[in-house]
Image (tube, rainbow, N blue to C red):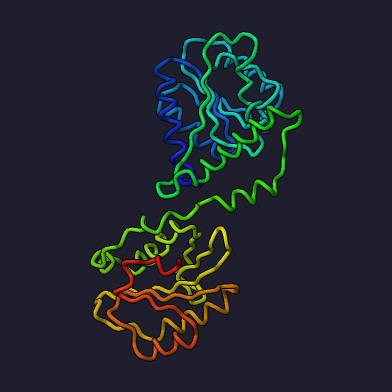
């Protein structure tokens, strides 16, 4: 289930719905995923103690039934209710003036689609003030380079441009290039906080891997953990969003930090390099006090970067 990926947007939406319910008004929520529509409808029913789940209009709802749902929704006034619609199915041909709140939980590359959805309440017979909401998840490190922020900026630019032209411009390749350039822009180096080595020592090995990969996201890297088995010798793989550079990471956590990190880490990375083609750099990270002489020698021969205990709190500055 994909709810965790959009929980921040849903949380913001429920804060909005709380206010709408307090005003005893109606709302339309536009959401593309049919699976998430089902989950959201049940969540709304349970949260607000509704007698039934919110009505849904999507591609699976036939024309006659669709009109019956619209008629039922339009009938009652002065009571809280919600209708969940797919943008493509509910964006045209419907009059839903009993609602005066629009929540766009799904965004579209073409702002004209969103505007058509909003127009469902801007019809003859609308006598209430209309509110339009765009819940957005903003990453604490990326800020205005977060996905939702960038998409909102792009749609705003395209909407303003379309108002000055007869035909709204659509250039998918240009939009994708703009997103690649701006999504997850690296934060200034000074914002990379030095880690506490004692906290690292207290980690379990898998937690150490998550820590090592998670720290790289703030520098514009996509981070992926490999499976616990059949991982090809790698603990994690990084790819930079802008340059496409790929990095393989091997993490060796020692419960007794005085232990030495041996050459098995080098063996793992060399095996991984043959599996994950195109990797430009290979790193070994460890909280051990030192690397063995053979490990240092082989790393130098193979061009592998060794990040030991003294350098570990500054990770991932070594990627800059």
Residue at point 58%, 53% (across, down): 181
Count of numbered circles on the image = 0
- Locate residue 298, reporting x and y percent: 44, 88
From the viewer's perspective, is residue 168 above or below residue 70? below
- Locate residue 97, reporting x and y percent: 59, 14
Seen from the viewer's position, the closer of residues 22 and 47 is: 22
From the viewer's perspective, is residue 270 above or below residue 191? below
Residue at point 60%, 18% (across, down): 121
Seen from the viewer's position, the closer of residues 91 and 1 is: 91
Residue 209 sits in quarter? bottom left
Q: Which residue is farthest right?
A: 166
Residue at point 59%, 49% (across, down): 179
Quarter of the image with the C terminus in it: bottom left
Residue 294 sits in quarter? bottom left
From the viewer's perspective, is residue 267 above or below residue 279? below
Residue at point 48%, 32% (across, down): 42
Seen from the viewer's position, the closer of residues 39 and 309 is: 309
- Locate residue 174, reporting x and y percent: 68, 48
Residue 241 sits in quarter? bottom right
Is residue 256 toward the left or the right of residue 219 in the image? left
From the viewer's perspective, is residue 84 above or below residue 169? above
């Amino acid at each position: 289930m994909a709810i965790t990926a959009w929980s921040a947007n849903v949380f913001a939406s429920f804060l909005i719905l709380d206010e709408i319910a307090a005003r005893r008004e109606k709302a339309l929520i536009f959401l593309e995923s049919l699976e998430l529509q089902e989950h959201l409808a049940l969540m709304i029913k349970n949260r607000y103690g509704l007698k039934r789940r919110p009505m849904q209009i999507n591609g699976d709802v036939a024309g006659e039934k669709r009109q019956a749902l619209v008629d039922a929704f339009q009938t009652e006034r002065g009571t809280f209710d919600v209708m969940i619609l797919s943008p493509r199915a509910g964006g045209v041909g419907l009059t839903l003036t009993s609602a005066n709140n629009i929540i766009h939980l799904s965004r579209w590359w073409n702002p004209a689609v969103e505007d058509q959805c909003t127009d469902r309440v801007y019809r003859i017979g609308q006598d209430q003030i209309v509110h339009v909401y765009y819940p957005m998840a903003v990453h604490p490190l990326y800020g205005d380079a977060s996905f939702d922020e960038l998409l909102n900026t792009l749609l705003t630019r395209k909407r303003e441009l379309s108002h000055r032209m007869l035909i709204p411009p659509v250039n998918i390749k240009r939009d994708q290039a703009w997103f690649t350039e701006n999504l997850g822009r690296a934060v200034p180096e000074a914002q990379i906080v030095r880690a506490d080595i004692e906290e690292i020592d207290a980690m379990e090995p898998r937690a150490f891997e998550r820590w090592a990969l998670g720290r790289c996201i703030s520098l514009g890297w996509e981070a992926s953990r490999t499976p616990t088995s059949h991982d090809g010798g790698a603990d994690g793989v990084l790819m930079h969003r802008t340059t496409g550079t790929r990095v393989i990471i091997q993490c060796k956590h020692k419960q007794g930090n005085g232990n030495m990190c041996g050459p098995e880490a080098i063996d793992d990375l060399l095996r991984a390099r043959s599996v994950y083609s195109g990797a430009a750099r290979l790193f070994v990270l460890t909280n051990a006090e030192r690397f063995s002489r053979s490990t240092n020698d082989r790393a130098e021969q193979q061009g592998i970067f060794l990040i030991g205990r003294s350098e570990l709190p500054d990770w991932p500055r070594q990627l800059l």
